[in-house]
């Protein structure tokens, strides 16, 4: 298993009554009432320091992503963060996992091809190229993209970026959303034919199929934990992979998990309970309608989600839950090193996950505590998880220069 | 008793097989529905007593063919597509009534080819924009049930109960997809250049507006009227954004008089 550290760069100091006083953490929270530009500068620096600390502690990768107009995680440009990380992790076996620049939000999309090629160059070939569709609230509400066009824009941008990376000839791009007379990308990525591609998603079957058809790694970004994802992953994702004629290599799947490690289970509750509750009560405080503006999902997915509102119901009931519920329902993996090890082993085996992403700075978690979590996780938990899958499978969705050898016949 | 029949019309290189509701007898009139989709109501029944009413549904909202919408990229395509729908129905020059989104489409048709639209009746149309009176984005109303406050003069009245009282999953799906397919042509701001083209409208024009319309403010009535030569405005008191549902007899009467004049 490969383990990357994910960071959202959240607002860590929202008022206690935030979710009562404000409509939403996304799109409409007033910056000047809730934040201070100098303090925000401190958040960015803490975020970078925490990811660099994770890389030094042995994290296989560091992940940043893109969101807009919010206090949940505000890195409008993940590539700016990635650039700092690429430079600061020189000499470490750490991938720069951009989860990443949102394809339909960038025009023309070759801008992403260029920036990712820059990151691959600066990092010496350590880039993982995430290709996110973008959320409805970011792309439709903040960036004005027509919801019903978002997926088509995404697919066109994906194809353009790959062609821009791989074509030896100058080419004209006559797309529906982008027309370019002479594409001749400078720079080009070090990794050939192109860096590994990860497709983040929230469990929609059409994205499962899209990733499997193109032989990309699909990354399930769920905040409802591995237990709730289990049906979707086992009964849908791996079946779609099989139907598309791909093997069952666990590295085809990434999964994001909130993790808190402390000396004991009791200490973990003392350390992390309030930050976990802050995360679920404040960071995900937004109108359910904004998660899917009409047209964001195709007709069938939209109809399914109204007929079987499992995710909507889980989302609506977050504020009724407390730390113990989040723990029991597997939304978070928190506890002593042994507890967390067991939970994550269970997760990786039940979902067949090769590329685990862990969120170690959660919500309001202060810098010092985040560093403790990072340190404990990589010292006490990660070493026991790494050998999983290494006896049989190679991570083809990882920069070649950073891949570990497969020890066939060794026990996991 | 009016019988409403469903007619399928294949247009746009036969890629779109759209449903058109047809009822009544007499001279033809076309009705273009708003963003929420087509509901056959008393207003259309009344019109059908003296006219043949043709009410095509927006592309993508015909049952069983949601992906039809993928064949139309922009407003230019949509306008040309509607000429083909009119051709297929044998309507060379016809009065068009449009509500809200449908009002904007009707205005675009009348502006782009004045010969095809003999009379134009717009009920609280979108299509123009004033920064001092922004139109709330109906696709992101939260909670979704609050939409009724933007649509109706009496959000707690009997019409509200009838239209929004019981939340039926299949109705919600239909409405959401209709908003998705109409939204394609107006997201995120319903101002796609009509102001540059509206002066080309030659058809006698009637604007009908709910005096208490909270979605598209009645100030827009003057915005439209001032740009269309000879346009007449009728305000409907005690009506919001759905005056033809809130006061069907009154609105049908005004439209009848306009069509027969």
Image (tube, coloured by chain):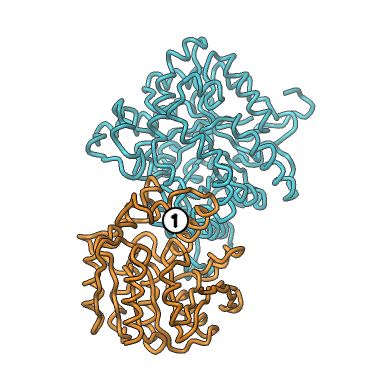
Chain colours: A cyan, B orange
The spot of residue A236 in percent (x, y) is 67, 42
Quarter assignment of residue B118: bottom left
Q: Quadrant of residue B5?
A: bottom right
Residue toward you, B118 or A346: B118
Whether residue A117 is situated above or below residue A369 in the rendered picture = below
Q: Residue at x 37, y 56 (%)?
A: B138
| Quadrant of the snapshot with the C terminus of chain A | top right
Q: Nearer the viewer, residue B122 or B255?
A: B255
Q: Give A303 or B164, whichever is nearer the viewer.
A: B164
**Quick check: B163 above or below A240?**
below
Q: Quadrant of residue B27?
A: bottom left
Q: Residue furthest front?
A: B1
Crowd class of label 1 (few under 14; some 14 to 19; many from 20; radius 10 Å):
some
Q: Residue at x 36, y 41 (%)?
A: A26
**Residue under circle 1?**
A111
Is A42 rendered above or below residue A298?
above
Q: Residue at image x 44%, y 61%?
A: B36
Q: On the picture, is A191 further left or further right than B26?
A: right
Give coordinates of residue A206: x percent, y percent: 61, 51
Q: Work out whether A60 lies above or below A382.
A: below
Task: Residue A159 in the image: state x and y as whole percent.
Answer: 57, 59
Write down the chain letter for disc 1.
Answer: A
- Give the camera-side residue of B247 and A406: B247
Left or right of A184 on screen, residue A253: right
Residue at 40% x, 43% y is A67
Helix, strand or loop status at disc 1: helix
Residue A335 visible from this viewpoint:
yes
């Amino acid at each position: 298993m490969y383990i990357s550290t994910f960071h959202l760069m959240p607002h860590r100091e929202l008022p206690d009554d935030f979710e009562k006083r404000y409509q939403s953490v996304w799109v409409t929270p007033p910056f000047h009432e809730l934040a201070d530009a100098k303090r925000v500068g401190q958040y960015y620096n803490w975020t970078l320091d925490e990811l660099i600390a994770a890389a030094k502690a042995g994290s296989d990768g560091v992940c940043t992503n893109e969101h807009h107009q919010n206090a949940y995680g505000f890195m409008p440009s993940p590539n700016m963060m990635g650039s700092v990380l690429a430079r600061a992790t020189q000499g470490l076996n750490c991938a720069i996992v951009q989860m990443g620049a949102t394809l339909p939000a960038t025009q023309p999309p070759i801008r992403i091809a260029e920036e990712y090629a820059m990151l691959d160059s600066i990092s010496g070939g350590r880039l993982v190229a995430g290709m996110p569709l973008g959320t409805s609230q970011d792309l439709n509400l903040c960036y004005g993209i027509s919801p019903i066009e978002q997926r088509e824009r995404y697919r066109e941008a994906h194809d353009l970026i790959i062609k821009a990376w791989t074509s030896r000839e100058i080419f004209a791009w006559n797309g529906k959303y982008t027309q370019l007379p002479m594409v001749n990308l400078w720079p080009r990525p070090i990794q050939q034919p192109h860096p590994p591609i990860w497709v983040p998603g929230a469990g929609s079957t059409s994205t499962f199929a899209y990733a499997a058809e193109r032989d990309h790694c699909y990354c399930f970004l769920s905040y409802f934990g591995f237990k709730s994802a289990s049906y979707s992953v086992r009964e849908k994702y791996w079946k779609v992979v099989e139907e598309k004629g791909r093997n069952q290599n666990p590295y085809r799947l990434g999964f994001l998990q909130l993790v808190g490690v402390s000396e004991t289970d009791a200490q973990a509750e003392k350390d992390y309970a309030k930050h976990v509750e802050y995360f679920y009560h404040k960071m995900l405080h937004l109108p359910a309608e904004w998660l899917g503006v009409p047209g964001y999902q195709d007709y069938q997915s939209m109809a399914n989600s109204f007929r079987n509102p499992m995710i909507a119901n889980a989302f609506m009931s977050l504020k009724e839950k407390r730390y113990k519920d989040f723990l029991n329902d597997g939304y978070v993996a928190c506890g002593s090193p042994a507890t967390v090890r067991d939970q994550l082993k269970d997760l990786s085996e039940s979902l067949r996950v090769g590329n685990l992403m862990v969120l170690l700075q959660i919500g309001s978690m202060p810098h010092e505590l985040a560093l403790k979590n990072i340190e404990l996780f990589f010292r006490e938990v990660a070493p026991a998880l790494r050998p999983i899958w290494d006896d049989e499978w190679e991570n083809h969705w990882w920069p070649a220069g950073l891949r570990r050898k497969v020890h066939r016949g060794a026990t996991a | 008793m009016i019988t409403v029949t469903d007619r399928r019309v294949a247009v746009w290189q036969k890629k779109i097989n759209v449903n058109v509701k047809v009822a009544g007898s007499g001279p033809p009139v076309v009705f273009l529905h708003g963003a929420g989709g087509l509901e056959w109501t008393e207003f259309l029944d009344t019109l059908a007593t003296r006219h043949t009413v043709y009410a095509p549904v927006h592309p993508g909202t015909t049952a069983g063919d949601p992906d039809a919408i993928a064949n139309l990229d922009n407003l230019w395509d949509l306008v040309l597509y509607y000429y083909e729908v009119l051709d297929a129905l044998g309507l060379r020059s016809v009065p068009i009534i449009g509500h809200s989104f449908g009002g904007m489409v009707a205005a675009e048709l009348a502006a782009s080819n004045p010969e095809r639209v003999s009379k134009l009746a717009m009920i609280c149309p979108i299509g123009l924009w004033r920064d001092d009176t922004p139109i709330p984005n109906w696709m992101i109303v939260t909670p979704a049930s609050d939409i009724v406050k933007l649509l109706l003069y009496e959000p707690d009245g009997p019409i509200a109960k009838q239209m929004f009282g019981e939340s039926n999953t299949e109705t919600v799906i239909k409405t959401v997809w209709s908003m998705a397919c109409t939204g394609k042509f107006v997201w995120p701001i319903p101002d796609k250049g009509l102001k540059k083209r509206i002066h080309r409208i030659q058809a006698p024009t009637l604007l009908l507006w709910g005096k208490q319309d909270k979605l598209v403010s009645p100030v827009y009535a003057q915005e439209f009227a001032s740009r269309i030569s000879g346009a007449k405005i009728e305000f409907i008191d005690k009506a919001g954004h759905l005056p033809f549902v809130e006061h069907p007899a009154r609105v049908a009467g005004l439209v009848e008089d306009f069509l027969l004049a």
